[in-house]
Amino acid sequence: MSRYRFVLYRPFQLIPVLIGISIITFVLIRSIPGDPARVLLGPRTTESALARVREQFGLDEPLWLQYFYFVKNLFKGELGKSILYKVDVLKLIATRIEPTLVLVIGSVLLALLIATPMAAIAARRRGSWADHLIRIISTAGLGFPAFWLAIMLILLFSVQLGWFPVTGYGRTFWEKVHHMTLPCLTTGLALAAVLTRNLRASILAELQSDQATAARARGLPENVVFWRHVVPNSLVPTVNLLAVNIGWLISGSVVIETVFAIPGMGQLLIRGIFTRDYMVVQGVAMVFACATVLVNFLADILTVTIDPRVKL
Amino acid sequence: MTDAPILTVNNLSVAYEGGGTSHTIIDGVSFTLRRGEILGIVGESGSGKSMTCRALMRLLPSSRLRVTGGSVWLEDGRDVLSLSQGELTQVRGRRIGMIFQNPASHLDPVMSIGRQIAESIRHHRKIGRKEAWARMLDILRQVGIPDPESRANAYTHEFSGGMRQRAMIAVALACDPDILIADEPTTALDVTVQAQILRLLQQLRDERGLSIIFITHDLGVVYQLCDTVAVMYAGRLCEYGAMHEVIHRPRHHYTAGLVACQPGSEGGTGRVHTIPGQPPSPGDMPPGCRFHPRCGAADALCAARQPPLRETHEGHACACHHPVGIEAEAEA
Amino acid sequence: MSGTRAISARRIRWPGTVTPLVLGAAILLTWLLIALFAPLLAPYDPIYQDAAVRLQPPSWAHPLGTDNFGRDILSRVIWAARIDLQIAVFGVVFPFVIGTVAGSISGFFGGWVDTIFMRVIDVVLAFPFLVLMLAIITITGPGLGSFYIAMALVGWVSYARLIRAQFLVLKNSDFAMAAVSLGYSNSRVMFRHIMPNAILSSVVFSMSDAVLVLLNGAAISYLGLGVQPPVAEWGIMIAEGQGFITSAWWITTFPGIAIVTLAMGFSLLADGLGEALGVRE
């Protein structure tokens, strides 16, 4: 269990990064030209509201003290109020987490489901037409704009075949599954292109590895060698790749939520930008950044679990 | 040691094919292995000793390497080289086990040792999970791994070098093979651990009647362990016979050179003895005897014609036109 | 042989003799020529609205159809090549330069300089790429200039990390040691001896980075925060056509294909360069 000791002290090591995240979000919003209180509350506001926000965030104080107020409010869970929705930003974000989470997790699962067999076929039949085809498709896939792919999938599955709804999220579990299939497939396909290339390369390396040769020498059939010894070892670097790509995945979800009108955090961010709802922009950016840090931490735990050699 | 050969390698040849050309890497290697015999295959790196054993297991490391001729007969008369894939998986592990120089890289790092052994047992024996696990613990005990119940759940990297090699022997012996191919299993170990592993192999031979092909470049190890020796040079067998015969009365000039290179060998002058020159590369083999450019006794015949492997004494064969200690007979 | 799976040690051969490098360069060159000669190649004015030919499917007069304003899609796709190529180039150049300078300083001097740079990089990397870019664009306002600023502020970290890692390896290499022992100054060793070696992998990376930059630029324009109408840009064209996909699929389809081919050109070039120069990403 000593290999898991990092779970206890790693959070402390992450403190500088979290401080950095708070500084960047703080600086970003304060660098908007104009009276910060008016910027934060928008053009149509009352003098009393302005005074309240000035006091809460110390907007009349020097900048370093303002940052102190900002962090203090952060610890109280107060990121300010949304101008548009008139509610606390954190509460607003909380209602938007589920669709985004479903989108990200669903995309990763679909991507693995697509990429693993593709990479397996390509690597085992190296140099065959199937390998070439998969290589060409995955190379092309890297360059597919997700929003365009989404529209093409809507055109095929929603407009032509009528299998899935065009936009929205739904209320019941099955409605949500129905609505989220196409969005997840879109990001999943884009991610699968990255994973397939990577997984193919590591399977090829692992197929020639000493441990695979030794497994063959024990008389294990090629299929057993492949699925029980080659693939598990090849998946280890893939987990890291997924963790590295989480930021990319969240970025993708922002766009995809806009295409499919999914009421998630990405959509909230984009609306916030257009309506100059800066508190919302600030809050969403910070939550996304913290989520990325958290996912990387979770990926470390997962890596330690699946690869007994790793010590962190 | 009984007389019936348990493995007969006959005229085995391997070629490297690439870029439109073909180089012979292994050229007509033949030897036999009897029950309970430990055969040492000796040679410099690149002499083809390892490749020979990979070839007879049909585990050549690249698709550009191909067996171009020969046969590998098992005791029951089957030729390993003409088995189907399905039959092959029954021979590998079940008839012939194999251990390697670097156990760290030849064991699956993400599967526990116990599960790797049990996996092989279940594949070959078709027995239940529990039974396989019990057998596995038994094998770990036999190879001298202390506290097998808890070590079975450990992973490769949690073992020390010597224990790793024991674990690999356990994996290889999981299905009770008749033959063990050991590819330089002690090269990476320090001397005391090396001695322990050699003792373990000897013990396994004595207790189970295991036959072992031991690949090494170390004549000292051969001297401690082997019954017979095959000396390889540049992909060919140059001397083959009973260990004491070969070591004490080498007939081939290359073997004589190897023996003289051993520190403390008979007739040693206290200086480090070396064989002049370098072994040839596969694409650039000299004609005739492949050793002749480095051989002090070479003449025009050696450069012109390849010497056949001939018996010079009972159970001692040598491929040389002018064997050491034997009057040169004029070849017609 | 049949005993083992056919695993050859050599690199995979692409069909025929067309290497990724050649194919990628050919695609890029084609788009470059299209962009250069857009005024000659485009049959119509890309922003001229002709109400008489609204939402026309592909025909001889309009090979790729027309949009809801009656603008010719082919002409718009051709003119947009200018903007999108510019996005890919500038979106890579600024981060490349900033990242190279930061990374080489960090890697060469080490110590507290390095520690500070690494902390900053960690923090920037903690933000999802697009989210941070969007946050910056929120301040600077929509537009292509904002996109380049955001790209430079966010994108430099990848190059800085790459160069820094190369420096750390090369700093201790024999030839750098030899140069220092010959009495060359720090900066001379840095820029004459280490930099040419370190920069090689960045150049290869910049090719695959161009794919991401292009997709990002198009995405931001699609969201309405980048290039502004009525300028022809592939991302905007896709956004403009989205409302008409049931009736006029051609408005969104063709700009997308344009992005895919240009991105494929960069990807192939990155693959080919990486293979030719022996650089792994």
Image (cartoon, coloured by chain):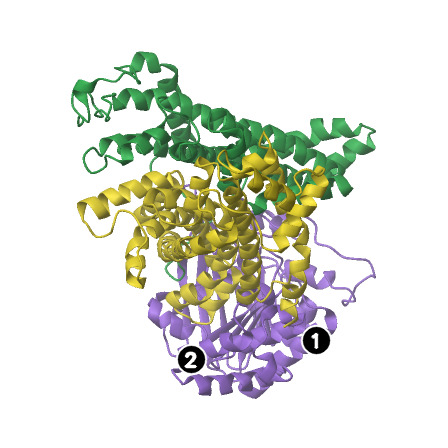
Q: Which residue is mark 2?
A: B122
The answer to whether residue A176 of the structure is visible from this angle is yes
Is A204 on the left-hand or right-hand side of C259? right
Q: Nearer the viewer, residue C82 or B47?
A: C82
Q: Which residue is mark 1?
A: B195
The answer to whether residue C201 of the structure is visible from this angle is no
**Residue B41 sits above or below residue A252 on the image:** below
Mark 2 lies on a secondary structure that is helix
Colour chain C appears in = green
Q: Residues within 10 Å of mark 2 (few under 14, many from 20)?
A: some
Q: Chain of mark 2?
A: B
Chain identifier of the yellow chain:
A
Is A73 on the left-hand or right-hand side of C28? right
Counting from the top left corner in percent of width and height, residue C46 is at: 30, 18
Chain identifier of the purple chain:
B
Q: CA distance from mark 1 to mark 2?
A: 32 Å
Q: Are marks 1 and 2 on the same chain?
A: yes
**Residue A7 sits above or below residue C261 on the image:** below
